[in-house]
Image (cartoon, coloured by chain):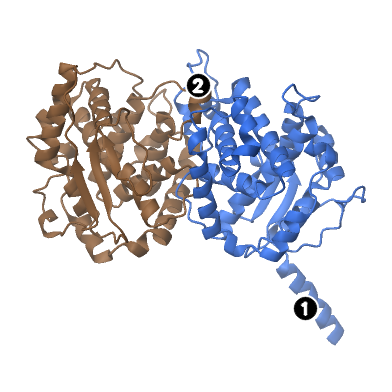
Chain colours: A brown, B blue
Amino acid sequence: MLIASTGCIMRNPPLVRYALALFLASILVSSSLMSAAGQGLTTITPNPQIQVAYIKPPVTADAAESAQLAATYAWLTTRRPLEELGVFLAPLKLPRPIKIQVDRCGAERRPYRSGDPVTICYELISKIEQVAGGIADPDVKLKVIVGTFIQAVLHETAYAVFDTLQVPVWGREDDAADRLSAYVLMQFSGEIATAVIVGSAEFFLVSSRTWTGSEFADTVSPEAQRFYNFLCIAYGGDNLDFGGWTQAPQGQDPLLPQHRASQCAYEYEQVRHAFDLRIMPYVNPDLALQVKAAQWLLPKELGK
Amino acid sequence: MALVKIVAAVALASLLLLPNWALAQTCLSDPAPSNEFAQVSNNTAYPICYQEPIDTNKAAYLALQQRHLLETFSKFLTPIHLPHPLMLVALNCERDYGTVSPFYNRDNRSLNFCYEWVDVVRKWAPAQKTSEGVTRANVIAGMWAGTLLHETGHAAFDMLDVPVFGREEDAADQVAAFIALQFSKDVQIAVIKGFAYFWRMAAKTGNDPPTASNPNPPADATARCFADPICAYSDEHGTASQRLYNTLCLAYGADPATFQDFVEKGWLPQSRAPDCGREYRQLALAFSKTILPFIDKEAMAQVRSSRWLLPEELQ
């Protein structure tokens, strides 16, 4: 756990484009992001309102890119992570179907529009691989890929949940999607929260770039802002597992500065309160416990 | 004997009815009326208190007092029925609270409007009308209104148990913008323009996060963090530019014709503008579900048709 154990901050390591083009596929065809064979999962009926699709990417003029897309598509259709999302969301009673797909978008994100499918873009998966390519430690690399992918799927799905359940969203919607997905992950074991939240937080840190002027008009927040939002929900939800972030190593500043850390319990409670008021009424509590008890990640993905 | 008992009972009752803050603070007496907004505030839902300013901020106190800002705002809030009184306090904040920025205090349900902040706004407001048509009175009134409404947003979130999924600081800016946008066009433009001018100036004068590390980092830990290009983003507030664009986007989303100017002048980038209608509608839904039920519609209609800004502030 790079950021928690050392407290050091990696900033913009050189990215090796396509250096690990098949990294995701090579690791994950042999394991899985969310293990379909995991204990308890097979007994839970997937949410019938979650419909999934993997759109086959076109062959492009760039051979390396085409190979990468084909490998990603092969992994997706073999391991079928979106079907597992359907199991994960089994407790959620939805008034109408939500379609979730992986598609080529021409950008890293395709903003959700009411009535349209939720889209995870191949470009985002490429970006995750690309960023992870700059991480030398293979354990951290795997954690970043797994964590970021799961977080990205939950994040995009949150938009459709807000829309479908007509949830009042105060604040910027993209931050709300981040906070909701971080909160949901915190309901699982410390190991899962650590793997996914730390993995995706690490992704935001290593992919952070300099923002100036009109770039701040983006509805998606700067990576560094998202990084601290994630850390804060995790620390606010569990200051024992994540307490190391507020401790300063010799001669250094803590990863989570005091002025923010002191607010995190409040931030976490705020999201919990919002969740209890506006989403919990649609959650089947018995199924939620089954989902919580299931084995979602393989030991390797948990850093064991 | 009976009379003594009654007097004692009344004294005790009035003590019990007084919130804690009132026992600990000394409020200056109401200033003498000097314009149409001056009224002795008897609004028990939104009591007011001007505390004695320190000498450095005397001018700020006088500016508020002459404008009868707290009295006016207390009256303005009448239609919003919070379950507890919200005390509106003008005070020096830095010595006791270590900040110059206004804040809502959840511990005693008070909105604290800092004299130091009033002076920051007065310092940043243009001395004369700018080439883009922004006046000094406009910026000061817009920022005062925007800031009071922002802090009222925090109070409403707290007292009305509002579900806040996004970042609360952004949400409080949304409350401010949304309420301002329910008034006449000239009020909307004045408040949004004043608020936007302030955050635009803040961004232009280096208040967005730094883009490079400071070779001589400050000794104070918080100052050192805000001087760091990553750590600066740990602030619970958005950056100055984000606050500018978020607010302009809501204004443009509510009424593209009225706020088209902001896009044409480049204050709101073209990249953000097309989706602003959706952002505004999402905010309107959140407001109508979580705050509107606590607003007295008849009283609000009256407030909306009343005059709140002076002619020079509307220019």
Q: Which residue is mark 2?
A: A212
Q: Residue placed at 76% from the left, 70% from the top?
A: B14
Q: In this rendering, would A38 be left or right of A184?
A: left
Circle 2 sits in a helix, a strand or a loop, which is it? loop
Q: In this rendering, would B92 be left or right of A141?
A: right
Q: Is residue A65 above or below residue B101?
A: above
For marks 2 and 1, give the CA distance.
63 Å
Q: Is residue B220 above or below residue B300?
A: above
Residue A299 image-quadrant placement: top left
What is the residue that sits farthest to the top in this orientation? B215
| Residue in the foreground of this view, choosing between A13 and B311 | B311
- In the picture, the disc for residue B9 is 1
Q: Position of residue A256 (x, y in %)?
A: 42, 34
Type of amino acid under label 1: Ala
Q: Residue placed at 40% from the left, 22% from the top?
A: A209
Q: Is residue A59 visible?
A: yes
Residue A2 image-quadrant placement: top left
What is the residue that sits farthest to the bottom in this orientation? B2
